[in-house]
Amino acid sequence: MRDVIHQFGVTMLAGFVLAVCPICCAAAAEEAQVVDGIAAIVNGDVITYSQVRALSAPRDKLLRQQFTGQELDKKLIELRQLAVKDLIDRRLVIQAFKKESYQIPDHIVDDRVHQIIRESFGGDRNTFIKTLEAQNYTLGEFKEKETERIMVQAMRSHNIKMNSIISPTKVEDYYRKHRNEFTSKEQIKLRMIMISGQKDTASAPAQKALAEEVLGKLAGGAEFDQTAQIYSEDSTRDNGGDWGWIERNTLAAPLEKFAFNMPVGRISNIIDYAGNYYILKVEDKRGGTTKSLAEARSDIEKKLIEEEAQGLQERWIASLRAKAYIKTF
């Protein structure tokens, strides 16, 4: 256990949902309010509304930019409920750590603070201290927060024992059910000439003849982009009919069928669609390939290990909740 604590004490605890680093959450300072109260009690430990606001602040700000009215109210309620739950779970883990009488050596916390100063403040300790003061934190309070973060990560690692070997059967089953995850999107690099058919007027035969004339020029060796600049009538005319790289469901279905089935470098015949005449050229293709099971195996094993770890973690936290006195307000 001591080794576990040391290992996580000297590394960045990135991505840890329950931890709130005041240095990284400047928005939380903007949400500071004078009025406070009890949001929850966990085995006698109090979680305050200010703690909930601090954890919610970054996401709160984003939600206010995206939603309004009743939808915003609903999102904010859900956000704060999640924040309360996260803070309760974090407190339960810290209590479990203390119950076992484990200790975090001071030098581990100091190493973590030095790492933050080095990586986030370019080694400038004065700027770090001023940032803490601007957010109403003392260095001691910051160290206390970091100590708790290390406690939580260490306890999670210590209590989640799992087999890091995934059976070949599970890997093969996942591959079979999720082949789309290992298939790259099919794309083509397309150029197009569009000539309006105007079939409701007497000019329709002339337009069809023009399309045939254009196709003849291309067959005779004319450059597609230059020909498009002269004859095409769609929005890509000035760019030589260049649509760039496109995926399926970009074009109308009949045009897509032709485009994605054409060999690279081939120029299509005239495609009569929706009253207009189209000539397509596929300049390149990419994607549309599926990794073999052998190629995907390591990614699948990693994913399944992560899912198993998440499940074990959730069950462990649930067992802590089941034994605790928790009251929310």
Image (tube, rainbow, N blue to C red):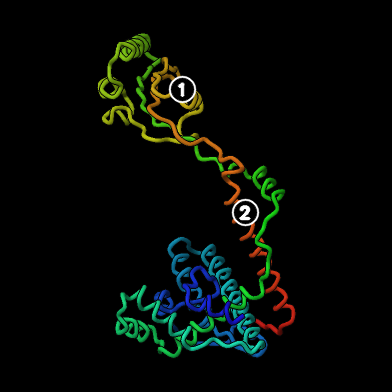
Residue at x 45%, y 84% (from the top left corner): 33
Cβ atoms under marks 2 and 1 closer than 8 Å: no
> To which quarter of the image does residue 111 belong?
bottom left
Residue 327's disc number: none
- Read off the residue under disc 2: 301
**Label 2 is placed on what type of residue?**
Glu
Left or right of residue 8: residue 110? left
Left or right of residue 98: residue 251? left
Q: How far from the left and from the top, in percent, is residue 86?
A: 59, 74
Residue at x 60%, y 48% (from the top left corner): 297
Q: Quadrant of the C terminus?
A: bottom right
Q: Which numbered disc flags the more N-terminal residue, 2 or 1?
A: 1
Q: How far from the left and from the top, in percent, is residue 131?
A: 34, 82
- Read off the residue under disc 1: 262
Residue 148 vs 247, above or below: the answer is below
Helix, strand or loop status at disc 2: helix
Tell me, yes or no, if residue 76 can be seen here: yes
**Label 1 is placed on what type of residue?**
Met
Separation of disc 2 and disc 1 at Cα?
37 Å
The answer to which of 235 and 289 lies nearer the viewer is 289
| 10 Å crowding of disc 1: few (<14), some (14-19), many (20+) | some
Residue at x 49%, y 35% (from the top left corner): 186
The answer to which of 150 and 61 lies nearer the viewer is 150
